[in-house]
Image (cartoon, rainbow, N blue to C red):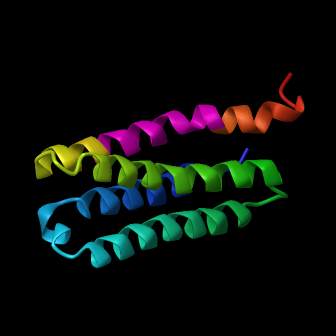
Amino acid sequence: MIDYSSSAVLTAFAILVVAAAMTPRTNTKPTWRGFVIATAIASSGLGTAIFSLSQGGSPLIRDVVAIIVVALLAPGLTAALGVRLHSAPAVARFFGALVAGLVFLIASPLLLLVAHCTSGDCL
C-alpha cells in the first residue's frame, strides 16, 4: 500500500484551515470564507495526488483514487458541518467541525484498506 502519513498530515492541515474559516473573524466575508474552504479542499486533494503518485514502485490506481477521495471528503465534511452549525457559538462551530473532520481522517485507513482489498489481493 501507499505511505499515507504525508497525505494525512496535509489533509489534517486542510481540516484545521476549514475549521478556522468557521470562526467569526472570517464569518464577516462569506466570499472569503468560501475561497478559503475551496482552496483548502483543492490543495488537500492535489497535494495528496502528488504524494500518492510519487511513491516508489507502481502504486495501484484504486489506492491513489481512494486516498484522493478521503483527502477531498475530510475537509468537505468539516465545511459542511461548520455550515450546518451556523447558529451555534463560534467555539462549538470550530471544535465540532474540527473533531468531525479528524474523526473521519482517523477512520480513513479502514476505508483505504477496504478499497485496497476489493480485488481479492488480500484474501
Residue at the top extreme of this rendering: 123
Query: Dividing the image into 4 quarters, which one contains the C terminus?
Result: top right
Q: In this view, does 18 lie to the left or right of 43?
A: left
Where 19 sits versus 40, above or below? above
Q: Count how many numbered circles sit on residues in the image.
A: 0
In the rendered image, residue 43 lying in the magenta stretch gets the answer no
Image x and y of residue 74, in percent: 47, 49
Residue located 72% across and 54% down the image: 65
Which residues lie in the magenta part? 98-111
Frontmost residue, 114 versus 57: 114
Where 72 sits versus 31, above or below? above
In the rendered image, residue 106 lying in the magenta stretch gets the answer yes
Residue located 22% across and 44% down the image: 95
Quadrant assignment, res 61: bottom right
Image x and y of residue 85, in percent: 24, 46
Where 50 sits versus 57, above or below? below
Q: In this view, does 49 lie to the left or right of 74?
A: right
Dominant secondary-structure state across the stretch colored magenta: helix
Query: Dividing the image into 4 quarters, which one contains the N terminus?
Result: top right
Residue located 40% across and 36% down the image: 103
Frontmost residue, 86 versus 59: 86
Image x and y of residue 14, in percent: 40, 61
Residue located 74% across and 38% down the image: 115
Q: Is residue 26 left or right of residue 79?
A: left
Image x and y of residue 12, in percent: 41, 53
